[in-house]
Amino acid sequence: MSRAATEWLMKATSASTLPTEVKMEIQKIANKMARLSARVKKARNFLATRVLIEGFNNANAYGPGSSTPYGNPLFFNAHPVGETGEVQSNIMEGTDRVLNQVNLEKAIEKARGMKDGNGTIVGFAASAYTLIVGPEGEANARKILNDGKEVASQVADVAISNDITVSIFQMNGFKVNLMVLPTLGQPSVKGKVGSGNEWFLLNTELSRELEAFRFIPLYEAKIDSYEDKKNKATVIDIDTEFTMDFYNPEVIIGSDNGANGAIV
């Protein structure tokens, strides 16, 4: 905040007496706050993306890339089902990692059969699932889902007439909505977040019910202000720290599409 704006605020005079230079300064502050808010949102998006991308390993002690309570990565082929002695997989492997219509159906079937810690199937009742892809995978995903239309333009990657086959991804129990995660496969201060070809299938309703995706403030935001003695400007300093993590792996299916879930 400039010296002129600081002096006007200290006098606490009417807004009708606001000098032009102070009006300009207030507009600049508003623009900076908008940019700050956008940067915070972008930082959260990158962190959320890292939770997914680093979920294929468990190299970290907490946050993205940390272990489940049973010591496994978020995406794993043998998650224990509580104390039942059963295991279940929430990861696409081998040739199933590539996103196409057949493999998306396989992911849905996998999601529909997921169980909670008591061994009860919890994925079957979902009214819709969410397919999460990055910008690089959006066009392919829209072709597979047919962009929300009532009929499919392809079956098993074979083009057919639009008036023949109804898309399974519009049917009850198999309905899929698309979410394009803008930070997936994009560069960040820690490196490129994934390859951009990874994809995930989320049981949206169950995820919200269980609060599986959790934003964790590490400490409350600290706001300090001080005066720069040299130019008499007021400086506002905002300090905050947060992380994210994912619980309940039974609500999400992941595919690294051969990229090994890497931050590169």
Image: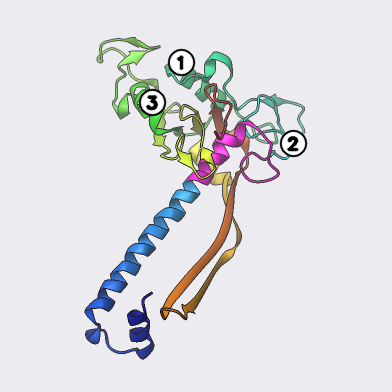
- Foreground mark, 3 or 1, reads 3
Alpha carbon distance from label 2 to label 3: 33 Å
Q: Is residue 174 left or right of residue 63?
A: left
Alpha carbon distance from label 1 to label 2: 31 Å
| Residue position for label 2 | 70
| Residue position for label 1 | 102
- Whether residue 63 is in magenta: the answer is yes
Is disc 3 placed on a helix, strand or loop? helix
Other residues around mark 1 within 10 Å, as few (<14) / some (14–19) / many (≥20)? some
The picture quadrant where one finds residue 118 is top right
Residue drawn 49% across and 50% down? 44
Give the magenta-colored segment's residue range: 46-66
The image's mark for residue 141 is 3
The picture quadrant where one finds residue 144 is top left
Point out residue 185 in the picture as x, y percentages from the top left corner: 46, 34
Depth check: 80 or 11 in front? 11
Point out residue 130 in the picture as x, y percentages from the top left corner: 45, 34
Type of amino acid at the residue the image marks with label 2: Tyr
